[in-house]
Amino acid sequence: MHTQISQPKDLQEAWSLRQRFDEDGCYISGGTWLRTQWEAKAFEMSSQLISLDKLLETKGISEKEILADSLEISIGAMTTLAECTTSSIIQRYLLPLFEACKAIAAPSIRNQGTIGGNILTTTGDSITALLLYDTKLCWYGGKGLEVEPLEAWLLKRKAGVIKKERRILVKLQIPIVVSEVEEGFSFYQKVGRREAFIPSVVTVAAKWISVESDSIQSIAISAGGGSAIPMRLSKAEQVLEMQKRNKLYYPKIQKVIKEEYEPATDAFASGEYRKIMAANVILSEFHKWSTKS
Amino acid sequence: MLLDKNSAKDKWRIRPDGKEKVTGSLQYLTDMTFPNMLVGRVLRSEYAHAEIKSINISKALQVDGVKAVLTHKDIPGLNGFGISNPDQPVFCSEKVQYEGDALAAIAAVSDEIAERALKLIEVEYESLPIVDSPEKALEKNAPLLHPKGNILHETTYFLGNMEESFEKCTHIVEETYETPRQMHTYLETEGGIFVSENGRLMVYAPTQHGYKDRMQLSRILALPEESIRIISSPIGGSFGGKDELNVQPYGALLTLACGLPVKMHYSRWESVVAGLKRHPMKVTMKTGVDRDGKLLAHQVRILSDTGAYSTLGGPVLNFATEHSVGPYIIPNVEIKGKAVYTNNGVSGEFRGFGGNQVIFALEGQMDRLAEKLGINPWELRRRNLRGMYDRGPLGQRVVPTNGALEVWDAIRKSSVFYKNKEEHQPPWIRKGIGLSMAMHGSGLGYGIPDPAGGQLRLNENGKIEVAFGHEEFGQGLIGTLEILLQDHFQCEKDDLEIIIGDTDKVPPSGSSTASRTTNMVWQALNRLKPPFLQAIFKRVTQMTGVAEKNLQTGPGGIWTKSEKEDIPSLLVITYKQLAKQGVDDLLFSTQFHYPVTPDPIIGGHYLYTCTSVAAEVEVNLLTGMVKVTDIHHTVAAGPVINPMGYLGQIEGGSIMALGFTLTEDAVMENGRYLTKNLDTYLIPTIMDVPSEQTVDAIEELPEGDEFGPRGVGEVGSVALAPAIVSAIHDATGIWIKKLPVKPEKLIRELPFLQEREA
């Protein structure tokens, strides 16, 4: 009955163990989310836990120049949320992600919980921030690294195509256009039922640039919260793209956000409330931006 | 007096147990271990309501490492517990009435083995319809939950003539208010260690009343009370929740069955399911005023969800009934209350004891009436406020108090009113200020045994030793006792020994509940001090020849009294030297009863404290979230003994009330808790607490008052909710009538556009 914990030294060994243990096995990184699931009896603690702690490939944050104005930022899946909140790379280039990690759970949990684990829950707050970028997930499935866009993976999870992920999430790759970061705008907002240490009711984020004549360009908006799998709000993006800063017509955008965003209803907050709030919070940020002198 | 470090001066004492608690080094009872200690676990019901067809423990008994599996058949005495009515079965035999009901208990060598064995107990149920609300329980064809019916207790109170008086009213407000199933959320969940040795049962388990636990256990175990010893402090929080038995019957039965020590400690999940909660109440009030704003008529209906069993559901309803009139003079009153059994979790004692719920309703009525009258709501209260010699809320005689007027007046000077309201804020932030007030009875009330007592002696080690049957569960009793004793005897802390929490060592003092403890220890010491000093001084005179009238107690021993400033006091004899001559004749004890009104109104209170609260809120219209930014309390409870303890009680009670108002609710659906852990049951974090919170203590008592300091354990928690709700109305124009406040009620679509258009 006792649970065994193995600590494989490389990806291949971890993968083999997972294959060998089959249904009895489970990867574990920080374990902070798994613990809540075991306690809630959502599922039983597996008899074979495979710790990813020793896998060097899954650690560290780095930046790599691709072209003159572009970078690729790589974040190891085993990077703790606390490490994300102290990383100058993340703070400089991925501000929404930086804000997201700061507001996940509490310090002790951020010290243990990892960004990979947060993504694998499919509802983690980091996802809403990462969806603003062309974030790619690098998986190990026995043969080299497979690269898959985060959004595509989420859509598969949402559709139930993948029920249980057997691959190991090794790292995230995030392409960045430096000038867009330096001259652009972004926000990340999470609202929970209290001020801190709280699951999200609604999480929204956006980024855009505004180079010519104060119009909105290259906009990305995402929303999550509660048990909803975070998503890009593409229709709202289409409505906002190329809109003039001083001529934003909020009721129309609000309507699109409310139609597009798909939050869940639970005992604590209705879906309708979450829709209103998501639209409110997103549009209040544009309102602040558009009224700023 | 604004309570803080500066005003308290040398009375600003860091609590004696503070450092150990903050650093985590304090060993709570549930941290203890004994050799060969077993783990005890309880099998809980799978249904909220079902008949039990059979219970088969044979497979569980065969598990290696299982030492005992017990069911209702193994109870030698009464299969029931409950402070006022023992109708909660230790183990269910015929039916289960809520999801926390116990069917069996296991003692095993490890938690894993106990857990595995629990799963092997086979229980056959036949499910019954679930009664998940008091309304359903009162329906004609509702399933019968208890032999005498689904109503645990009813209250009625009449004064004057309802119908005629409503006809005379200029304005009438009728509203139904609802309050949540609040959880005590002590840091230390219920637990304890049980040891059977030399024919005695040792119970190391937190409680607010060791002697009551001893009585209840003796009834279950069919053992003489003297054979049971209850060791009950330190306690990691209680707030009323550990006054009733919890793990004790199971731990005791298991250790007696196995002959080995047994530890029980509920997980948070089990604590949620099996533990007590605050009674959810629906309070309907119809209140009328004349055109001058004089209250003429007040009709109250209280419907209280007491859950599956009694515990203190009856007394809580009595308290709610009495407090639904508050500090106001109303000539025509009609109150009808019902505490109703359901298949929900058991409701019981909780800080405020039924007052919090009705005060929220009553103060809401006052604000709404003022709005109808078009007058300031605080002015409306003044026009109806009780005077010093008015009778109590149920017409009973009470100890004269001017507290209501004093707190009414004092809050008007609060800094909350003098803030710059013009601060730059985004257009979706609305600020508001709200006020409320309450009076709160202390002690158990007329007709309920409410004994007190204590013991004072010089012990063998030369310490001035006091012993009380009260408990320290974080409220600061030990610190308060230390200050009281040093005030009485002018001695050092080292000269004192304080004994609590052990039925073998302390006299019965009644429960540490109902804001009664500070007052009871104060009264006990006043009674014990004169004979104690007289005996000591007599002894010293015999030994030294110094006249009794020239002696006084002081640091380390007995000193001469110095009549002139330039003549120093001299140490005559140390306490230790004195103790060497024998201490048998230096022990004094006292027994007395908590002061009670002479009028035979069951549960009616005699001693009252008053409070008023000002709260400032910010409502974010984008999200509907409410942030409380400032709270100011005034409390009229007599002299402050322990300023830091007093402040801690008011601030702590206030934060608990903040949770009650904004986030806390143990949500049940079909008789099952949805909020099984602290990620969905939300208590305030430090980020939710206003950075400013002030407490103004009004210490003056009417001339001739001989009752001394009133306790403040509850009064900080009773009046904040209506102040916050009033502030929300001030900010948004929206009246909230159901707690906790649902942000969905306050959110507005695109509020910055409305602002622009406005």
Image: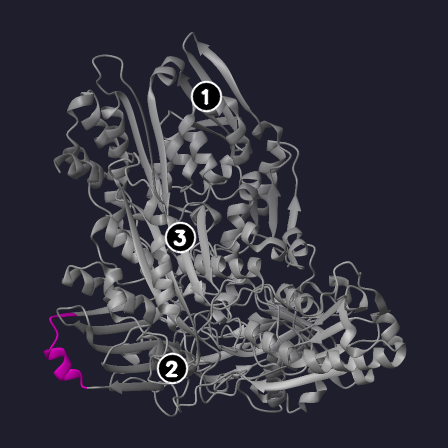
Look at mark 3 in the image and give the residue it sits on.
Answer: B631
Assess whether residue B170 is covered by the magenta stretch.
yes
Number of other residues with Cα within 10 Å of mark 3, as a class: few under 14, some 14 to 19, many 20 or more = many
Q: Which chain is mark 1 on?
A: A
Q: Look at 75% across and 63% down and name the residue there.
A: B564
Helix, strand or loop at mark 2: helix
Residue in front for this viewpoint, B661 or A51: B661
Rounded to the nearest angstrom, the CA distance separating label 3 from label 2 is 29 Å
Q: Look at 67% across and 74% down and name the residue there.
A: B501
Assess whether residue B44 is covered by the magenta stretch.
no
Q: Amino acid at mark 3?
A: Ile
The x, y position of residue B454, in whole percent, is 66, 80
Compared to A274, does B560 lie above or below?
A: below
Q: Which chain is mark 3 on?
A: B
Look at mark 2 in the image and give the residue it sits on.
Answer: B318
Look at the image and tell me whether residue A124 can be seen: yes
Viewed as shown, does residue A263 lie left or right of B247?
left
Look at the image and tell me whether residue B668 can be seen: no
Q: Which chain is mark 2 on?
A: B
The x, y position of residue B490, in whole percent, is 71, 65
Q: Amino acid at mark 2?
A: Asn
Q: Range of the magenta residues?
A: B161-172
Rounded to the nearest angstrom, the CA distance separating label 1 from label 2 is 62 Å
Look at mark 1 in the image and give the residue it sits on.
Answer: A92
